[in-house]
Amino acid sequence: MNHPIPYYQELYAQIILHTGINMRAHQNIVIKTSPKSYEFAQTIAAQAYRLGAGFVYIDLVDYALYRERMSAQDAQQLSYVPYFEQVMQQQYLSEDWATSGSTIPRTVRNSQRSPLTSSPPIRQRSDQAPRPSGLP
């Protein structure tokens, strides 16, 4: 059976949502992505809404700029986290957002542990969106 690429992207998005982040129905989700992967992040976001996500936020990240910062700044400069980022991270923690990657800065992580900073559980939760049909 020869399927077009978007078909496999949809299936992969479902796998990410169910197995990778273990999305629950009505849960908010943050997806970190680079500009090169933005289109696929949109596919994941659309699939999340179809599976019952409450709100999906796509956080566009410039990883090349992060590398430049890491190589140019000392430890004290690197420890700085802007206040608006801290507020967003606290909201992710307090509202139990699901995440596509590690989005909790070290300063927030050290002040409050959360399910977001540990590995997602493998078991299926009863409030989780139903498994998609058609997975190979």
Image: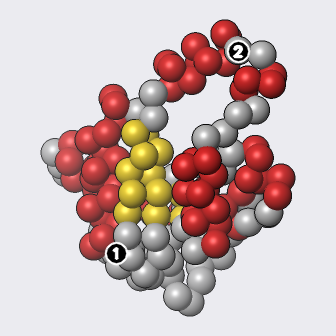
The mark total stands at 2
Q: For the C terminus, give its image quadrant.
A: bottom left
Residue annotated with mark 1: 51
Asked if 127 appears above or below 119 in the picture, the reply is below
Locate residue 121 relative to residue 87 in the image: left or right.
right
Amino acid under disc 2: Gln
Q: Residue furthest top?
A: 72
At horizontal 26% and vertical 41% (from top left) the residue drawn is: 39
Viewer-nearest of discs 2 and 1: 2
Q: Nearer the viewer, residue 129 or 53?
A: 53
Relative to 134, is 112 on the left or the right? right
Q: Amino acid at mark 1?
A: Leu
Residue at x 47% of width, y 57% of height: 30
Please give the residue where the numbered disc 2 appears in the rendered image: 73
Determine whether the residue tagged by mark 1 lies in a helix, strand or loop.
loop
Q: Is residue 97 above or below residue 125?
A: above
Residue 59 drawn at (x, y percent):
42, 46
* Distance CA(mark 2)–CA(mark 1): 42 Å
